[in-house]
Image (tube, grey):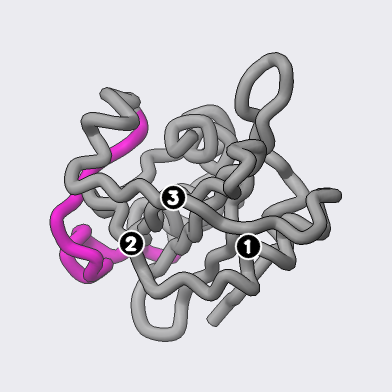
Amino acid sequence: MYGAFLDSWSEGGKYTVNVYKAAQLRTQDPGDFTECAQKLGEPAAQWGESYSFRNLRSVIGELPYVHFIRSTDPRALGREWSAAEAATKTAIIQAGFAHSVVTLSAITFNKQRTLAMFHFSSVCGGLCGYGHVVAFKRTPNGWVLQKKSAACGAWMS
């Protein structure tokens, strides 16, 4: 699920993504997940198991555009881009990806195991970042990313 989400978020691996290497349990507000489930047509969801990972590389695998990092501090990622380098829209987007850190929370399933959700955040330092709940819904063809979930529990600074 993490890999499928990162593929979508990075536009099919078009941009390098710095991902914090661990997906940890966090104090989850079940309201975020419940509200998102309702938007996806799953009312009264009850939440069950959560799965965290110390090493996301073991779950995601070797995606050529994913750079696993040990620190969530964006200052550890390297140099600033000059105005000339960031002159095009693509360069601006690449600069944003290059200087941000993505964190992913543990995956939590509803008790029926028809929904799976986790929190995503991308932080580029100071008051620069955003995040939301990511939802996958089980279908007869497997787990499918729910694009509507990007509006669930969304924040921006």
Asked whether residue 85 appears in the rendered view, the answer is: no
Dot in front, 3 or 1: 3
Task: Determine the residue located farthest toward the top in the rendered image.
Answer: 141
Instruction: Return the x and y of residue 132 as percentages of the image width and height.
Output: 59, 63
Residue 25: assigned label:
2
Q: Quadrant of residue 67?
A: top left
What residue appears at the point 14 percent right and 55 percent down from the top-left corner?
70
Measure how far apart labels 2 and 3 are at the Cα level. 11 Å
The vertical placement of 142 against 69, above or below, is: above
Locate residue 120 relative to residue 113 in the image: left or right: left
In magenta segment, residue 150:
no
Q: Determine whether the residue tagged by mark 1 lies in a helix, strand or loop.
A: helix
Q: Disc 1 marks which residue?
A: 33
The amino acid sitting under disc 2 is Leu
Question: Badge 1: how crowded within 10 Å, few (<14), some, or many (20+)?
Answer: many
Q: Nearer the viewer, residue 150 or 10?
A: 150
Q: Determine whether the residue tagged by mark 2 lies in a helix, strand or loop.
A: loop
Measure how far apart labels 1 and 2 are at the Cα level. 14 Å
